[in-house]
Image (tube, rainbow, N blue to C red):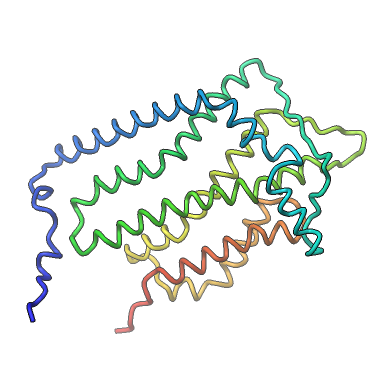
Amino acid sequence: MPQKNTETDMVPIPDDSRMTFWDHLEVLRWSLIRIAAVLVVLVIVCFLMMPHIFDTIVLGPTSSDFFVYGWFSSLSRAIPFIPDFSDDSFHVDIININVASQFMTHITTSFWLSLVLLFPYIIYELWKFVSPALFASEKKPVGKAFLFGTLMFFIGCLTGYCLIFPFTFRFLAEYQVSQTIVNQISLNSYMNNFLGMVFIMGLVFELPLLAWLLSKLGVIHRGFLQKYRRHAVVVLLVLSAIITPTGDPFSLMLVFIPLYLLYELSVRIVRPAPMPS
């Protein structure tokens, strides 16, 4: 049987080996230029579509007809401990108290939404930049890691939008320390919480990818994560309580369970503990 040429798999692309430091900088510069050009196009498109996007998506959690509330309203009839979202009268009016807030919100929201949509293209350009420097045997696993990180980012953003932010917002919007105080939520306050929770969850879902990279660098291994699993549970519970200060166990578990599953996924994908010498 013909023998597999392992030497070929461990040799970087010849073209890359002939590139100088300045050649690499030139390649990086053009990658950044292409990313910036695509970003500008996406910002313009999102800016033009923002009035519709803002009413249907961004302000969706402010009304009882938000689709997530409908789902959990149905579940609450079958599962007692799920919060009851069947109140059809729930509605929060977002007010503006600064002259330029609506215009600036239009621009900033278009920019952040464009970044989310641009994320796969950024990963693609990053892959194009680093792939020539990889060994042939490394390209497949690293390519899968880039794809996995992109997918997990979007799953995290969807989790923040569909679960974390609606539950937190509805609790805080309806909470009153005194019946004489009326909640009036400003546009800036709403957007800061909305964008913050969505993007934080997107970044949190990159935990398995970060663990994999640290494992490749030899910083952590599977035995380390297994040894400190109990400590990690405490840290994740505290983090969940910070993200969702609602006080009820259901909302706490709604955040904690995905974070814990991410930790367990990290345990599975990192390298095993090194064998004792």
Q: How many labels does the image show?
A: 0
Q: Quadrant of the C terminus?
A: bottom left
x then y, percent, for residue 173:
77, 40
Residue 241 figure quarter = bottom right
- Residue 24 is left or right of residue 252, and the answer is left
Relative to 61, does residue 102 appear above or below in the rendering?
A: above
Side of 148 where 138 appears, left or right:
left
Give the position of the N terminus as an image quadrant.
Answer: bottom left
The residue positioned farthest toward the top in the image shown = 99
89 sits to left or right of 1: right
Which of 233/40 is in front?
A: 40
Residue 72: x %, y % from top left: 73, 54
Q: Residue at (11%, 44%) from the top-left corner? A: 19
In terms of depth relative to the viewer, which is nearer, 135 or 233?
Answer: 135
Kindly give the residue lying farthest to the bottom in the view shown. 277
Instruction: Name the residue at 57% across, 69% down.
Output: 231
**Residue 102, placed above or below residue 78:** above
Hey, which quadrant is residue 60 in on the image? top right
Residue sitting at 78 percent across and 30 percent down? Answer: 184
Give me the residue at 81% from left, 40% from top. 90
Residue 198, horizontal then vertical, whole percent: 57, 44
Where is residue 237, by image quadrant?
Answer: bottom right
